[in-house]
Image (cartoon, helix red, strand yellow):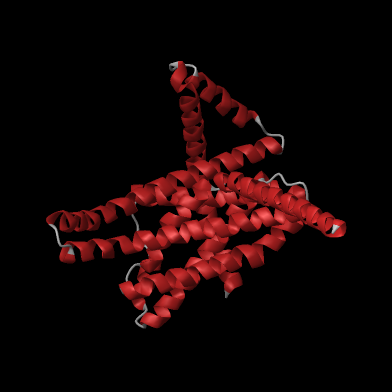
Amino acid sequence: MSGLLALLDDVAGIAKVAAASVDDVAAAAGKAGAKTAGVIIDDAAVTPKYLQGFAPARELPIIWRITRGSLFNKLILLLPVAMLLANFAPWAITPLLMLGGSYLCFEGAEKVFHVLFPHANHAIDEDMSIKDPGHLEEQKIKGAIKTDFILSAEIMTIALAAIEAPNVWMQAATLAVVAIGVTLAVYGSVAVIVKMDDVGLYLAGNAPTPVGRGLGRGLVKFMPVLMWILSVVGTAAMLWVGGSIIIHGLEVLGFGWLGHLIHDWAYAVGHAVPAAWEGFAEWTAKAAMDGVFGVVWGLVLIPLATKVVGPVLARIGN
């Protein structure tokens, strides 16, 4: 009996350690996931465009296939690479973060440039030339998964840089939790967004009360506005996150003058308002300046990406 009680006591001790580890992983995953908020918002804003032109019955199956592709990107392709970098080449994390931040700045600035100077969208022209719906669906899914890979790489790198874990196993478990949680949050949100207009149409035509039918019509009218809001917020988040990553990376590499200047200006803005608004004003000023830097850096990168990087990648792909 004493042996059994000792065994049960050991099991209880192991369970306590395991529970603490789970709590640590969850806490670290939440902290790391919060760092990726800007990229997550953009991911949720970008994905619905891949569903335009498809029958409502195909929307959820397409989202599910993109979700599976995203999980494969994060857990099978990117997680092992991230762990190798963290444990054997940690010096490479900052340059990779800056590379990803530059991509975010480029994407955000390109969207701003397109709004200011509208030009033809070659991707839409290519889609219009595809007559077979099945082939178009496959092309759209492949395009969405490729885009997801880039955004996922940025998410995983940002999360990895934010994780403070005592050992490699806790680090890997935390990163896996972040990967799964972010993927489900993004594509679950996308599923809700793309089906909301169908819900509105159903309520508008079938709700038993005038209030329900009015709610349905309101949903249908609001969805384009929501998509526009998501697009604007996603672009702003890309520029803010991208700009802040580049500025922080420069500080890590020993070029901290710009980061210090922005900090000082934001500090001055925070102390120019009532004390109750000081923290909010300082954060907003810093985020705005990071975003402005992101726009400027992205605009610098546009000719480089379109005239040099793009043609080189196209040749490699062919």
Residue 175 vs residue 206, the one in the foreground: 206
In the image, residue 99 above or below residue 58: above
Q: Is residue 89 visible?
A: no
Residue beneath the point at 47% across and 29% down:
285
Q: Give residue 52's quadrant in the image.
A: bottom left
Relative image position of residue 306 (x, y in whole percent): 50, 58
Q: Give residue 132's quadrant in the image.
A: bottom left
Q: Is residue 248 left or right of residue 125?
A: right
Q: Residue furthest left?
A: 210
Residue beneath the point at 43% across and 49% down:
234
Q: Residue furthest right?
A: 3
Q: Is residue 118 left or right of residue 259?
A: left
Residue beneath the point at 61% across and 46% down:
32
Relative image position of residue 98 (x, y in whole percent): 63, 47
Q: Is residue 115 left or right of residue 152?
A: left
Residue 65 vs residue 2, the one in the foreground: 2
Residue 297 vs residue 92, the one in the foreground: 92
In the image, residue 106 above or below residue 317: above
Residue 74 vs residue 169, the one in the foreground: 169
The quadrant of the picture occupied by the C terminus is bottom right
The quadrant of the picture occupied by the N terminus is bottom right
In the image, residue 177 above or below residue 291: below
